[in-house]
Amino acid sequence: MKLDKKVPISILGVVVVAIIALSIFFVSHRINNDNITYNKIVSYVSDNYEMLENFSYSEIEKIKSSNDKPEIRKQKEEEILKRHLGENTIVTSVYAYNENILQFYCGGSGFLDAGTYTGFYFSRDDKPYAFEFNNLKLVEISPGVFEGQDGHRIRTEKIRDKWYYYIQYWY
């Protein structure tokens, strides 16, 4: 019985395409991966919470509302963060979600709406928040640890009074 030559060529083609696809995925994941670990974030907040509590968002707010090009706004924000939080800060961006929440973004991996994002936040009223997933109900799964899932997923954990770690999963 003679094998059809098209079958091995088809299998080889599928294998080559799979190798290329996996290579692109792993290379892009490495390029777009600046996640900071849970332990590093908790340690950073524990060591710097007094300085972080005195962080003034007003300078960054002015930059974010300016007419500068996005890359200029980003550069100015980085300069402010380094000036107030030190050259070795793990914080790459800061957002005020409302009068109660100041979010400190530390890194992520993936692409846009298919990624993982980590950081910490100050909660003036000492409650956990779900940020962009504000309609998401957070459930306490163990003391000080909250999770919510509804198309996206967030896990937030109390570090100390008014300070929480978060990791968001977008998919």
Image (cartoon, rainbow, N blue to C red):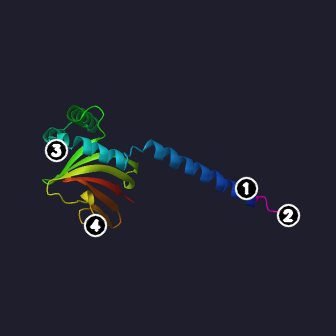
Disc 4, SS: strand
Q: In the image, what residue type sits under mark 2?
A: Lys
Residue at label 4? 140
The quadrant holding residue 130 is bottom left
Magenta residue span? 1-6
Image quadrant occupied by the C terminus: bottom left
Callouts 3 and 1 close, C-beta under 8 Å? no
- Disc number for residue 9: 1
Q: Earlier in the sequence, mark 4 or mark 3?
A: 3
Number of other residues with Cα within 10 Å of mark 3, as a class: few under 14, some 14 to 19, many 20 or more: few
Residue occupying the point 25% across, 41% down: 47
Nearest to viewer (mark 3 / mark 1): 3
Q: In the image, what residue type sits under mark 1?
A: Ile
Q: In the image, what residue type sits under mark 3?
A: Glu
Disc 3, SS: helix
Residue 164: image location, x then y, percent = 25, 53
Work out whether 7 lies above or below 165: below
Residue at label 3? 53
In the image, residue 143 lies in the stretch drawn in magenta: no
Q: In the image, what residue type sits under mark 4?
A: Glu
Number of other residues with Cα within 10 Å of mark 4, as a class: few under 14, some 14 to 19, many 20 or more: some
- Disc number for residue 137: none
Residue 86: image location, x then y, percent = 25, 33
Residue occupying the point 21% across, 34% down: 80
- The answer for how far apart the CA atoms under marks 2 and 3 are is 76 Å
Residue 68: image location, x then y, percent = 21, 36
Residue at label 2? 2
Q: Earlier in the sequence, mark 2 or mark 3?
A: 2
